[in-house]
Image (spheres, helix red, strand yellow):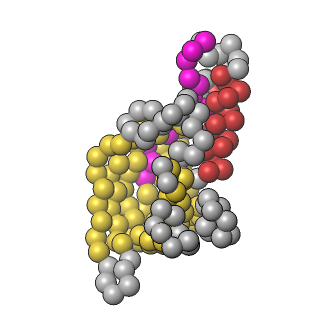
Amino acid sequence: SDAPGAWPADREFDAREVAIDIGAASLWAYRRGAPLEIADVRVSDGTLVMLRTPGHLSILPALRDTARARAAALQASPAVAPGAAATALVLRHVRFDRMAVDLYDATVPGGKPQHLRFEQVQGTVAALVLPRLAQPVVLDLQGVLKGVERDGRVSLKGSVTPPTKSPLPDRCF
């Protein structure tokens, strides 16, 4: 869609293989109102789409919205102490192999978002706590940025704490 802030692709995410490692104890705790804690996610042979708008980077908005709705329900329940922020989903470790990332940057002047394509993306993301993202997310990713005339290697290693303005941010993640 060409509407400002509209999702720029037909899909948010697509992968040939997604493997999830979740323990019985985590499922039992989730059933009692605790956040769903997933120890390991392995994703391969797929594409992830991201949209950058002024002040925001949106990734998997459907997952974010689901986590936000679950956190809001938890916040209203006696399972969360007054004044504390609810967490709906904890991803301890996510591993990417043979992935592509399509980044659409709507902060570049000119109307239509600028499209950057990364291929051969591999690496890990750790410590994702949704929907808040108020603690550092650990990144160790490598890939190839596709260019018009030539390609370039890209590496991202370190941690980032996304800015939050409220316990349930509207557009972060």
Q: Against 159, is 10 above or below?
A: below
Q: Is residue 89 magenta?
A: yes
Residue 92 visible somewhere in the drawing:
no
Q: How many numbered marks have been drawn onto this rendered protein structure?
A: 0
The image shows residue 72 at horizontal and vertical percentages of 67, 29
Query: At 50% across and 50% down in the image, what residue appears?
Result: 56
Q: Against 29, is 148 above or below?
A: below
Horizontal side, residue 132 vs residue 5: left or right: left
Q: Is residue 93 magenta?
A: yes
The image shows residue 3 at horizontal and vertical percentages of 67, 65
Q: Against 23, is 65 above or below?
A: below
User: Along the line of sight, which residue is nearer the eye, 74 or 148?
Assistant: 148
**Magenta-colored span:** 82-95
Query: At 69% across and 35% down in the image, what residue appears?
Result: 69
User: Along the line of sight, which residue is nearer the eye, 54 or 121?
Assistant: 54
Residue 41 visible somewhere in the drawing:
yes
Query: At 60% across and 41% down in the image, what residue appears?
Result: 170
The image shows residue 9 at horizontal and vertical percentages of 62, 68
Query: At 44% across and 71% down in the image, what residue appears?
Result: 116
Work out which quarter of the rendered image holds the N terminus and state it.
bottom right
